[in-house]
Image (cartoon, rainbow, N blue to C red):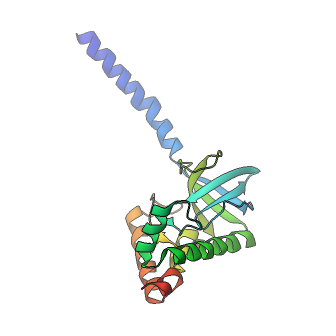
Amino acid sequence: MKNKKIKVLLVCSFILLVVTPLISVAAKWKVYEDARLIENDFNDGDSFHVMCNKHHYIFRLYYVDTPETSDSYPKRVQDQADYFGITHKQVLKIGDDATKFTHKLLSRKKFTVYTKKEDARGNSKRKRYFAMIKVGDDWLSTLLVEGGLARIYGYKVDLPENGKPIRKYHARLKSTERKAKKGNRGAWKLAE
C-alpha cells in the first residue's frame, strides 16, 4: 500500500514538473509584427485572413463581435439587433460598415498580431485563432467599439504587453461604448 502511494505521488510530481510548464508555454502570447491583411471574401469586421512571417492565418478578435454581413446566422443577427436596438436589416448594414472599417484600417499599413493560438472555431478548413490586433497605439477591438461597429461580446483574456487584466480592459471598453452610444456613432445612431 505504501509503495502504491509513493508511485502515485511520483506520477503526480512528474506531471506537475513536466506538463505544467508546457501548458504555461503554450499559453504565452505570440507576437507577429509587420502583419498584412490578405484579401479574402470571408473577411469581415472581426475575423480576417492575415500574412505573418510568410504564414497565412485566420484571426478572430477577442472581446468584440461585429454585426453579421449576411443572414447565415439568423439567431446571431437577432441577438446583435437586440443588443444595439436596431432592425435586422440595419445589423447587416452596420456589419458591412465594420468590414469596410477593418479592411481600410488593416490594408493601409502593417499591424501587430498578438495571439495565444487559442482555437476560435470557424467554418473554414483552415484553423482560426483568437487574437488582439494593434494598429499603431490602438487596439482594433477598441476602435470598433468606439465607432459603434462592434458589441462587447465573446472570449476575453488578459491583454498582451502590459498584461492589463480582463476586468480593466472590459471596463475600458464599456466606457468607450457609453461614449459611442452617447455620440450616436455607428449602430447607436440607428437605435430606436
Q: Is 54 left, or right, of 64 in this rendering?
A: right
The outermost residue toward the right is 54
Residue under the image location 68 percent in, 57 percent down: 49
- Where residue 122 sits in the image (x, y, percent)? 57, 51
Residue under the image location 53 percent in, 69 percent down: 67
Q: Of 45 and 31, which appears nearest the observer?
A: 45
The outermost residue toward the left is 1
Residue 72 seen from this side: yes
Q: Of 121 and 79, which appears nearest the observer?
A: 79
Quarter occupied by the C terminus: bottom left
- Where residue 143 sits in the image (x, y, percent)? 56, 75
Which quarter of the picture shows residue 7? top left
The outermost residue toward the bottom is 183
Quarter occupied by the N terminus: top left
Residue under the image location 26 percent in, 16 percent down: 5
Q: Is 151 left, or right, of 29 in this rendering?
A: left
Q: Is 105 left, or right, of 167 in this rendering?
A: right
Q: Of 43 and 58, which appears nearest the observer?
A: 43
- Where residue 90 sits in the image (x, y, percent)? 53, 78
- Where residue 85 sits in the image (x, y, percent)? 42, 79
- Count all numbered tags in the image, as a single digit: 0
Q: Of 154 and 23, which appears nearest the observer?
A: 154
Residue 152 seen from this side: no
